[in-house]
């Protein structure tokens, strides 16, 4: 899959209450978050492009759409992109990442296949990997292991 994102210039303080992550559960989805210095990052518009050149050719139009949607949702900010980019990501058949020790590779761990949910699953992956590396385990590790059934 491919996704597109924009980042604005820093915006006024207190952009929205708590500057919480906003995720619009539509198809295609849209997410909005802020950085500590007030930059707004907006992304989404995912499509199934495997070829990087084809994906990158869409940066202008996809990011213009993101900017329009951002401005419509948050009319008190300047949604003009200071930066725009595209990227690829992978999904698992279950829509959840694979996290754990890589089979056949001693002392090698991985966290991959987040799909469009890296922000959500990255903290969980960090906790699971910490437990596996330190030897204390994690009660959720089996749900994301390389050995789970699809």
Image (cartoon, grey):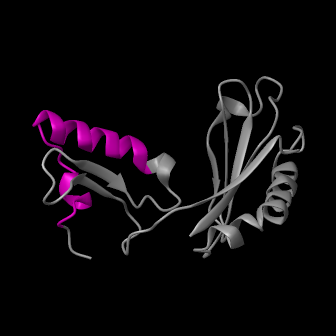
- Numbered label tally: 0
The image quarter in which residue 79 lies: top right
Give, as a single range, the part of the protein colored magenta: 121-147
**Residue occupying the point 77% across, 61% down:** 59
The extreme left residue here reads 135
Q: Quarter of the image holding residue 43?
A: bottom right
Q: Nearer the viewer, residue 47 or 55?
A: 55
Q: Is residue 114 left or right of residue 59?
A: left
In the depicted structure, whether residue 83 falls above or below residue 48: above
Q: Quadrant of the C terminus?
A: bottom left
Q: Please state which of residues 38 and 86 is positioned toward the viewer in this rendering.
A: 86
Q: Residue 76: image x %, image y %? A: 89, 38
By secondary structure, the bulk of the magenta-drawn segment is best described as: helix
Quadrant where the image shows the N terminus: bottom right
Question: Residue 97 at x, y = what percent?
Answer: 36, 59
Taking depth in this image into account, of 63 and 150 the one nearest to the observer is 63
Residue most extreme to the front: 53
Residue 94, image x and y in percent?
A: 36, 72
Residue at figure coordinates x 83%, y 25% from the top left: 12
In reply to whether residue 50 is colored magenta, the answer given is no
Q: Residue at x 33, y 40 (%)?
A: 126
Residue 69: quadrant of the picture: bottom right
Q: Residue 56: x, y in percent?
A: 72, 64
Q: Residue, x 16% and y 44% (percent of image)?
A: 107
**Apparent side of residue 7 relative to residue 52 in the rendered image (left or right):** right
127 to 18, vertically: above or below: below
Determine if the magenta segment contains residue 135. yes
């Amino acid at each position: 899959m491919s996704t597109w994102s924009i980042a604005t210039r820093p915006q006024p303080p207190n952009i929205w209450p708590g500057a919480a992550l906003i995720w619009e559960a539509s198809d295609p989805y849209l997410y909005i978050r802020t950085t500590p210095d007030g930059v707004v990052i907006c992304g989404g518009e995912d499509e199934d492009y495997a070829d990087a050149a084809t994906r990158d050719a869409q940066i202008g139009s996809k990011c213009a759409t993101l900017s329009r949607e951002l401005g419509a949702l948050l009319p008190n900010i300047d949604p003009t992109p200071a930066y725009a980019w595209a990227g690829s990501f992978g999904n698992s058949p279950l829509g959840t990442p694979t996290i754990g020790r890589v089979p056949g590779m001693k002392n090698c761990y991985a966290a991959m296949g987040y799909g469009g949910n890296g922000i959500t699953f990255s903290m969980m992956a960090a906790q699971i990997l910490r437990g596996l590396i330190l030897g204390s385990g994690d009660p959720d590790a089996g749900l994301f292991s390389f050995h789970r059934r699809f």
